[in-house]
Image (cartoon, helix red, strand yellow):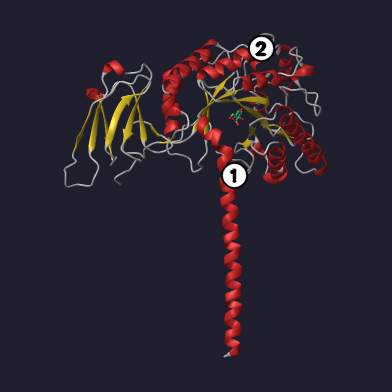
């Protein structure tokens, strides 16, 4: 009897220990989630960012770094572009005002692409525009200042792989410097971490946009240490996903996701034409209205768009890109209430177009593509009563009719909303439905 009691109490004691450990783990996980949510909030609300690929590749107008890696130009000839990178018409105030005007809330500038050419005065390398190009100065600092003046968040792109560094294993697609050499690896790590620490300390970016992680493992990069280093400098910094598992958000590239990515936080990075950097031969620009439509799809799935521009070697921004930024600005400022701080909209099947939802879930925004058939759009699956429908950025009240909602049914009706020609936006019209409470779906 006594033995059984002892066993029972041992069991109870173990159970208590296990339960205590589980609840400590749960509390820790909750704290980590809260900490992340707080850190990510500005990013989640910002919706639009501008990516800037600026480097010596703009001189010839060729693929950034990849052109020598893939053998389209020799490494020596690629590096000759250093001589033509003048930045003599670079006007960071103008850049920042264009970005601000587009409705973007942050920008991400390439501090160093895979070619290893640093846009700042790095003490870890002499491959930098300060010493090796006619630009002859730090190009990051004045831009960061202007962004901050305009209350825009500062992002810096940094390629962890460096095809120019003598101690980095990979050089071109068919030439490797070494495969296994702990000493050279250590030398490269010192350089790489050194440069990251430099930009992190000097410019205190709100966002670090790493790239090129695919060539090595997290262990090889010492990715955990990189993350820690960045967060030690600025506990609020955000890190993109390209750090072999040590980032904060997903970065789908070029392809617009058809379904929302798994991660709560994500950003589609996309070029305006087919090139990241400036290429005079590439005139395959998407139209401003196509870009707005892509942007609206991102919003509808709760993501951001990081839209790329590629300034010329002298620092001027091509007119086609300026035009797109301006049209984005017109559209985003007219429809700002449907964009910033809003959440993903309706699940598929309810409305044939993108949609967003206010943070308190009581306002539903429908994005109307072009002129709807019979000047009406159709909405299904929303159970709420509608208090009012109006056109965003213009205020006009819209009429609607609800069908298929007999008095005895608890199901949602089928709603047809009038969207007459007079209220149509040239690019994309947005209408707001004020619901009688939080959005309730009938399925
Ligand atoms: C890719 C490319 C690079 C480009 C980047 C932008 O990783 O390597 O050239 O800068 O995507 O997302």
Specify whether residue 90 is in view.
Answer: yes
Q: How far apart are marks 1 and 2 (CA)?
A: 38 Å
How far across and down, in percent of the image, does residue 419 sit? 27, 23
Residue position marked by numbered label 2 in the rendering? 90
Helix, strand or loop for disc 2 = loop
How far across and down, in percent of the image, does residue 227 sit? 68, 41
The part of the image, by quadrant, that contains residue 308 is top right
For this view, does 380 lie left or right of residue 63? left
Direction bottom: furthest residue: 1
Labels 1 & 2 near each other (Cβ < 8 A): no
Does the beta carbon at disc 2 come under 8 Å from ligand 1? no
For this view, does 300 lie left or right of residue 278? left
- How crowded pointer 1 is (Cα within 10 Å; few <14, some 14-19, many 20+) is rated as few
The disc placed on residue 166 is none
Direction right: furthest residue: 183
Q: In this view, does 251 lie above or below 10?
A: above
| Residue drawn where x is 60% and y is 54% of the image | 28
Residue position marked by numbered label 1 in the rendering? 35
Q: Which of 270 and 402 is in front in this view?
A: 402
Q: Nearer the viewer, residue 353 or 233?
A: 233
| Residue drawn where x is 69% and y is 33% of the image | 174
Specify whether residue 252 is in view.
Answer: no
Q: Of the residues under marks 1 and 2, which one precedes in the sequence?
A: 1
Which part of the image, by quadrant, shows the N terminus? Answer: bottom right
């Amino acid at each position: 009897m006594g033995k059984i009691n002892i066993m029972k109490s041992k069991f109870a004691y173990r159970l208590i220990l296990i339960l205590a450990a589980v609840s400590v783990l749960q509390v820790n996980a909750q704290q980590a989630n809260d900490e992340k949510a707080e850190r990510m909030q500005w990013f989640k609300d910002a919706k639009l960012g501008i990516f800037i690929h600026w480097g010596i590749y703009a001189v010839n107008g060729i693929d950034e770094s990849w052109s020598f890696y893939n053998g389209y130009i020799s490494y020596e000839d690629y590096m000759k572009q250093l001589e033509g990178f003048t930045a003599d018409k670079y006007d960071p105030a103008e850049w920042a005002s264009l970005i601000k005007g587009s409705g973007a809330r942050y920008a991400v500038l390439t501090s160093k692409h895979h070619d290893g050419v640093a846009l700042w005065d790095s003490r870890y390398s002499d491959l930098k525009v300060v010493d090796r190009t006619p630009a002859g100065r730090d190009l990051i600092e004045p831009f960061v200042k202007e962004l901050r003046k305009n209350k825009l968040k500062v992002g810096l792109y940094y390629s962890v792989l460096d095809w120019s560094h003598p101690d980095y294993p990979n050089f071109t697609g068919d030439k490797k410097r070494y495969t296994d050499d702990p000493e050279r690896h250590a030398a490269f790590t010192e350089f790489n971490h050194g440069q990251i620490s430099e930009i992190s300390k000097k410019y205190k970016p709100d966002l670090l946009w790493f790239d090129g992680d695919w060539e090595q493992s997290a262990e090889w990069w010492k990715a955990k240490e990189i993350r820690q280093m960045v967060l030690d400098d600025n506990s609020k910094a955000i890190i993109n996903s390209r750090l072999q598992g040590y980032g904060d958000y997903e970065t789908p590239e070029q392809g617009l996701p058809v379904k929302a990515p798994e991660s709560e936080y994500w950003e589609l990075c996309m070029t305006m034409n087919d090139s990241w950097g400036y290429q005079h031969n590439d005139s395959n620009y998407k139209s401003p209205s196509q870009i707005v439509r892509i942007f609206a799809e991102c919003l509808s799935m709760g993501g951001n768009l990081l839209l790329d521009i590629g300034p010329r070697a002298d620092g001027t921004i091509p007119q086609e890109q300026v035009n797109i930024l301006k049209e984005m600005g017109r559209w985003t400022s007219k429809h700002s209430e449907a964009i910033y701080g809003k959440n993903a909209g309706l699940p598929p099947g309810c409305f044939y177009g993108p949609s967003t939802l206010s943070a308190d879930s009581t306002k539903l925004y429908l994005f109307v593509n072009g002129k709807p058939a019979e000047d009406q759009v159709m909405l299904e699956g929303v159970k709420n009563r509608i208090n009012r429908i109006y056109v965003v950025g213009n205020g006009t009240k819209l009429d609607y009719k609800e069908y298929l909602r007999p008095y005895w049914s608890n199901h949602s009706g089928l709603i047809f909303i009038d969207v007459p020609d007079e209220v149509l936006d040239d690019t994309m019209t947005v209408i707001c439905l004020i619901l009688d409470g939080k959005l309730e779906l009938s399925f």
